[in-house]
Image (cartoon, helix red, strand yellow):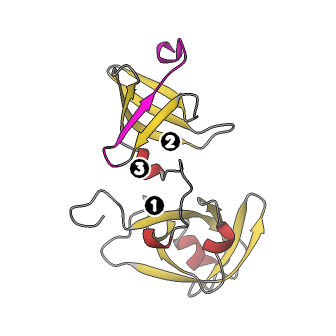
């Protein structure tokens, strides 16, 4: 993160799952809505660790080729020339500078903007803080840890009434019984 800022400098866009074949190609699970742009030939990506951090000695990799494969992408990276090199980066994350992220539409948020945010009801009761965001269908779920309990809150316009990324506050209007589950 930049000094004096809660905004990260890097955005996770994919996770290297495992080697594919013997020539260094890797299976990547995309963590972006635009994998075609992120994994484009010639694109420079930062290789993060298994937690998504860049570390003290950052390593950049260049996409040489990519193709869709099942629910992921098969990606060839420069300097990852064989299965052994591909195995060494398995489980690690791929990142881009946050300034290179596609502009968000109104109402869209990065997960990092939601994590740690305080969740309150429209009446002002504190529910807890967002501990995790789950990418589920038909809607994302916020895991909110409150006093002595954990709530799963649907991230829908019917429930979430306001998200203030600046103050890290989310206002919800939960349907009857949701907070008792």
Side (left or right) of 125 relative to 25 = left
Q: Residue at x 44, y 71 (%)?
A: 99
Residue 19 makes an appearance in the image: no
Q: Residue at x 48, y 12 (%)?
A: 180
Residue 16 versus residue 127: which sits nearer the camera?
A: 127
Q: Residue furthest front?
A: 106
In magenta stretch: residue 114: no
Q: Check disc 2: other Cα within 10 Å, few if <14, some if 14-19, many if 20+.
A: some
Distance Cα–Cα, label 3 vs label 2: 11 Å
Distance Cα–Cα, label 1 vs label 3: 20 Å
The label shown at residue 133 is: 2
Residue 94 position, x and y percent, is 52, 69
For the record, the magenta segment spans: 166-181
Q: Choose mark 1 or mark 2, whichever is in front.
A: 2
The label shown at residue 113 is: 3
Which residue bears the numbered disc 1? 50
Kindly indicate the quadrant of the structure image that contains residue 64.
bottom right
CB under 8 Å between callouts 1 and 2? no
Lower sequence index among marks 3 and 2: 3
Lower sequence index among marks 1 and 2: 1
Quarter holding the N terminus is bottom left
Q: Choose mark 3 or mark 2, whichever is in front.
A: 3
State whether residue 76 is above or below residue 159.
Answer: below
């Amino acid at each position: 993160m930049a000094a004096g800022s809660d905004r990260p400098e890097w955005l996770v866009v994919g996770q290297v799952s495992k080697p594919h074949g013997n020539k260094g190609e890797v299976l990547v699970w995309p963590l972006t809505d635009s994998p075609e742009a992120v994994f484009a030939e010639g694109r420079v990506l930062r290789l993060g660790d298994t937690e998504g951090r860049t570390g003290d000695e950052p390593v950049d990799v260049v996409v040489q080729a990519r193709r869709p494969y099942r629910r992921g992408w098969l990606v060839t990276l420069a300097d990852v020339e064989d299965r052994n090199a591909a195995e060494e980066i398995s489980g690690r994350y791929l990142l881009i500078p946050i300034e290179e992220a596609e502009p968000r539409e109104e109402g869209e948020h990065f997960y990092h903007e939601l994590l740690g945010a305080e969740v309150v009801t429209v009446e002002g009761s504190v529910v807890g803080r967002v501990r995790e965001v789950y990418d589920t269908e038909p809607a994302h779920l916020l895991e909110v840890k409150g006093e002595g309990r954990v709530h799963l809150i649907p991230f829908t316009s019917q429930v979430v009434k306001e998200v203030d990324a600046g103050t890290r506050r989310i206002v919800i209007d939960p349907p009857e019984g949701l907070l008792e589950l």
